[in-house]
Amino acid sequence: MTFAERLDIGEKGLHASGSRLDKTNCQRWMQPLFTNPLVSSNLAGVTEPFDMTAIRDNLLRAMTERKVKPTTLSLSVGKNRTLVKDLLEKSQDIQVGTLTKLAGALNVPLSDLLAAPRVAVVGRIGAGGTVIFEDLGNDELVLRPPGISGTLVALVVEGDSMFPKYRGGDIIYIQRDHDGILLDYIDEDCAVRLTGGETYIKQLIRGSEPNRWTLLSLNAPPMENVEVEWATPVRFIMPARSRRAYS
């Protein structure tokens, strides 16, 4: 199955309660990228620091995907009703035993809560905002942006045809969980799939004909009154300089 096919169908089954994301859903994990001078007092003989920011992000994402409330999760591992709330909001350290229990209650490996999350690169954005989905063959991964739940995929901007809005090497993150177009997407930069199969990153506006849309970009003529199969907004942009700093 190609990455384009995976993007089309993969989102529809990703949010079922109790399921976890894996490589088939373009969501992978690696060892911690950022470190923090905080070491759990319960890690005898272990000196590798915990990244509390990554733990919070990973825990919150796992809870959101499984629709688990903080109090419910807290009581599933002990008697402290505010355990998870405190961890998400103010705790600066966590015992490995507690983290192991939380991972078990959420049915995820402990490493999923510890690791700095990554996102698979599934294609490139070329001249005129054209998106080329491809199996890159090298399992390229980029840092996952914080604060966004659900499954993301990443696209790399190539060349300067979209300058100054996007530069070569920038990473654009998108996700899909439905077909069609939501009203909130109008006037936003979106990944847009036409009924003919082409995909673009362009600003989406209403067309002059019923049920048609016009796609705008800075350095290319408008694509007027096209039929759109689906659109999804750009969720996050990582500039190339940040990508180099954190890769």
Image (spheres, grey):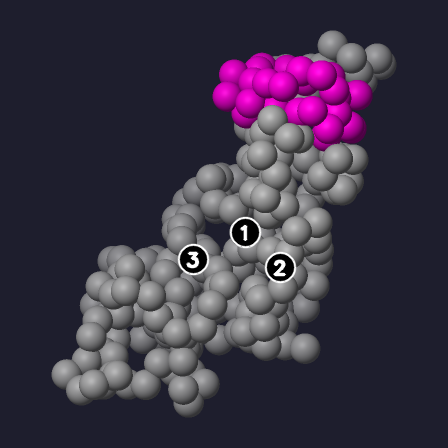
Q: CA distance from mark 3 to mark 2?
A: 21 Å
| Mark identifier at residue 162 | none
- Secondary structure of the residue carrying numbered label 2: loop
Q: Which residue is under mark 2?
A: 14
Quadrant of the rendered image containing residue 58: top right
Which amino acid type is marked by label 1? Gly
Majority SS type along the magenta span: helix
Task: Specify the amino acid type for callout 3.
Answer: Ile
Residue position marked by numbered label 3 in the rendering? 172
At horizontal 59% and vertical 44% (from top left) the residue drawn is 67
Upstream in the sequence, badge 1 or badge 2?
A: 2
The answer to whether residue 35 is left or right of residue 231 is: right
Depth check, mark 3 against mark 2: the one in front is 2
Q: Are marks 1 and 2 in contact (CB under 8 Å)?
A: yes
Above or below for 170 versus 132:
above
Front tag of 1 and 3: 1
The kind of residue tagged 2 is: Leu
Secondary element at image label 3: strand
Badges 1 and 3: C-beta atoms under 8 Å apart?
no
Which span is picked out in magenta?
74-102
**Residue at 68% across, 68% down:** 137
